[in-house]
Image (cartoon, coloured by chain):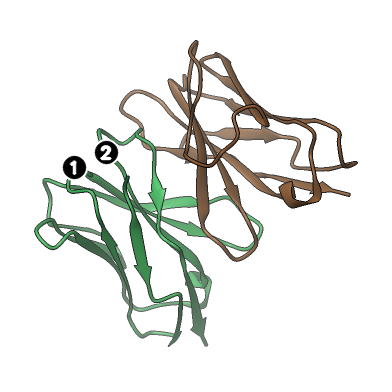
Chain colours: A brown, B green
Amino acid sequence: GAVVSQHPSWVICKSGTSVKIECRSLDFQATTMFWYRQFPKQSLMLMATSNEGSKATYEQGVEKDKFLINHASLTLSTLTVTSAHPEDSSLYICSASGRGLPTFFGQGTRLTVV
Amino acid sequence: GENVEQHPSTLSVQEGDSAVIKCTYSDSASNYFPWYKQELGKRPQLIIDIRSNVGEKKDQRIAVTLNKTAKHFSLHITETQPEDSAVYFCAASKGNQGGKLIFGQGTELSVKP
């Protein structure tokens, strides 16, 4: 299957700081990328849908000013968690889909806010 | 919006037995239903999917059935092996394979040797 890569795989940051997570499609052009959050032993909760060159569409209850999403190219989307707090600690997983392709997931970024 | 319910939340079977996981969805416009397997600490991996114009699909020991009228779909794993142990998620999507996925709550499958 197609390859989707996230960077970093894990990050620890201090409360109040911002963290940027990258999601790249390595061997296909991703017209759409999705960002999910997964707490331990829970399901994947969709945060936002990101289309290349346009503003992200956020799910209900997700603060767009706190979770900034940029999808500047067909192979890269970034998620910035601003003013992170301990309750933002979670696994953040991106997925990407291209024309006619199913959705493939990145390996996830484990964020710990201390 | 779409809501996907998945049962059971945990499932324990003996090696060689079959395992069945069931999901229901709420939005009749959903037309693509993938199943993902997530091993501990790893990313979800697509194992099988089905579109709404098909009632059943099989891939070796894995099969998925879809009942559009009842809005439910199921994953069937036959001849289970210990390496099948993982968390399985169903999902539903509208539009096409690349549409946003709404996930079920997940089923933790344990296959005992």
Residue, x 62% and y 34% (percent of image)?
Answer: A5
The chain carrying label 2 is B
Residue, x 48% and y 15% (percent of image)?
Answer: A52
Instruction: Tell which of A86 and B50 is nearer to you.
Output: A86
- Label 2 – label 1 distance at C-alpha: 6 Å
Say whether disc 2 or disc 1 marks the residue closer to the N-terminus.
1
Q: Are marks 2 and 1 in contact (CB under 8 Å)?
A: yes
* Image location of residue A30, percent across then percent down: 46, 22
* Mark drawn on residue A32: none
Residue B59 in view in this figure = no
- Give the structural element (helix, strand or loop) at label 2: loop
Residue that label 2 marks: B94
Q: Name the quadrant of the N terminus of chain A.
A: top left
- Give the structural element (helix, strand or loop) at label 1: loop
* Image location of residue B3, percent across then percent down: 34, 54
Residue B110 in view in this figure = yes
- Residues packed near mark 2 inside 10 Å, few (<14), some (14 to 19) or many (20 plus): some
Q: How many marks?
A: 2
Image quadrant in which you'd find residue B57: bottom left
Q: Amino acid at mark 1?
A: Ala
Q: Amino acid at mark 2?
A: Lys
In the drawing, does residue B56 fall left or right of residue B80?
A: left
Q: Is residue A105 above or below residue B54?
A: above
Residue, x 40% and y 77% (percent of image)?
Answer: B80
* Image location of residue B100, percent across then percent down: 39, 37
In the drawing, does residue A87 fall left or right of residue A55?
A: right
* Mark drawn on residue B29: 1
- Residues packed near mark 1 inside 10 Å, few (<14), some (14 to 19) or many (20 plus): some
The chain carrying label 1 is B
